[in-house]
Amino acid sequence: MNQFDVSTFRQHFPLLSNRVNNLPLVYFDNGATTQKPNIVIDTESEVYQQYNANVHRASHALSAKATLAFEQARAKVQRFIQAEYLEEIIWTSGTTGGINLIAQSWGQKNLKTGDEILLSHAEHHANIVPWQMIAEKTGAIIKVLPLDASGLIDENGLAGYFNEKTKVVSFSHISNVIGKVNPVKKIITLAKKYKAITVIDGAQACAHLPLNMQTLDCDFYVFSAHKMFGPTGVGVLYGRRDLLTAMPPYQGGGEMIKKVSFLGTSFNQLPFKFEAGTPNYAGVIAFSASIEFINSFSLAELAKYENLLTTYCYEKLKNIKAVKFVVEEKPDIGVLSFTVSDSHNYDIASGLDAYGIAIRSGHHCAMPLMDYLQLSGCIRVSLAAYNTYAEVDFFIDKLTLLIDGNVDEVIVEPPRREES
Ligand code: PMP
């Protein structure tokens, strides 16, 4: 494999040559969603133009072709995350969809009054609210794991949070604000000791870390295609086969049944039991193209480049006196969160937008984390392998201008609003 060449890589992403406010777009909001390469856009379009038909329904040629591509995508995901069995891969609408499925299906069947669900202070709302909803229904209690100074789930005293009532431990592999890899193995080992299930939110990890479900040995792992150059509206729920088999369906409808009569219904086998209704097959097939695209460059090569770029950006930001990182340590992936002394986060974000630089300000769907850190919000720069050193330089230059108050007339005053 040749050394990673960012300019070749960028050429695959048509949107990156767009201009914003008459300046070249600098897209630094990859933690929210990544841009899509031509192969993903073309694959989705090809499905609709060449073989659009509902999957698993009909005997005709179009449906057979769509079904084959849809199931091949499942096998591709199985290999990508090294799951033991194909039927452990369930299609969802995204990370949020996956966590809701687990909470409602596993939780409704297994949780009872007084049982404990462990989350951490650094969770995305998608890994808090579904648990609150099922806790309310079942009488289970949520306990929250503290963080250490580097923003990770604190390993000290961790064991003290576990007891025989602990039934679920659900946490992010990498927080979307902190950008550091949690001590996953240690938490999984502890959870096993107490026979609690582990649910890992891999939304931020899936595009940056090689995943191996068999060595990780968690019970559930969820992630979203759109964070890894894939389409929106597609996600993956990995679950251990024995657990999925024992779980009741989450939603009812077509495809998830074996037999329906007014006397009762029997359910389909895995994975279809959890895939009621027409799936987003065009998106799933396009997602398969995004995995192939990543593999063709190698995830490790992309991560290596991202890491160098992140270090570069981190060091530059560190040299700006007014910049206060949310946690001091360099993140493990290209997620850099900070505030700027004497400036409103939104003013910085909209000031940068006037220069065509897309970053994010607000609570990042992590309000409890903001409370924990005693922040009203923060600014997040999130990098991907198509970002360049020149873009980082441009961003640092414009951020410095804004901090120094040397704003040119290019800046327009947008309506004031805190982004979520
Ligand atoms: N968890 C984390 C850590 C995330 O970063 C995100 C997306 N920002 C989600 C969950 C939710 O993902 P989705 O909106 O794709 O369901």
Image (cartoon, rainbow, N blue to C red):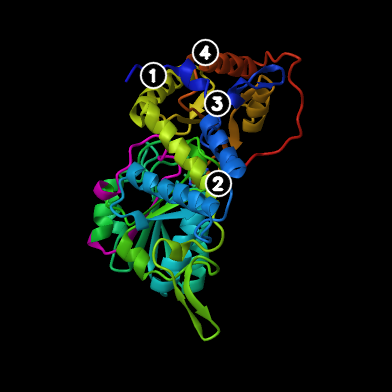
Q: Which residues are magenta?
A: 193-215
Q: Which residue is mark 4?
A: 390
Q: Secondary structure at mark 1?
A: loop
> Of the residues under marks 4 and 3, which one precedes in the sequence?
3
Q: CA distance from mark 1 to mark 2?
A: 30 Å
Viewer-nearest of discs 1 and 2: 2
Please state the horizontal and vertical placement of residue 216, each as a whole percent of the image: 27, 48
Residue that mark 3 sits on: 13
- Mark 4 and mark 1: Cα distance apart in space: 16 Å
Mark whose residue sits in front, 4 or 1: 1
Q: CA distance from mark 3 to mark 2?
A: 19 Å
| Residue 329 visible in the shown view | no
N-terminal label among 4 and 1: 1
Q: Amino acid at mark 3?
A: Phe
Say which quarter of the image contains residue 312.
top left
**Residue 276 seen in render:** yes
Report crowding for label 4: few under 14, some 14 to 19, many 20 or more residues within 10 A (C-alpha).
Answer: few
Q: Amino acid at mark 1?
A: Phe
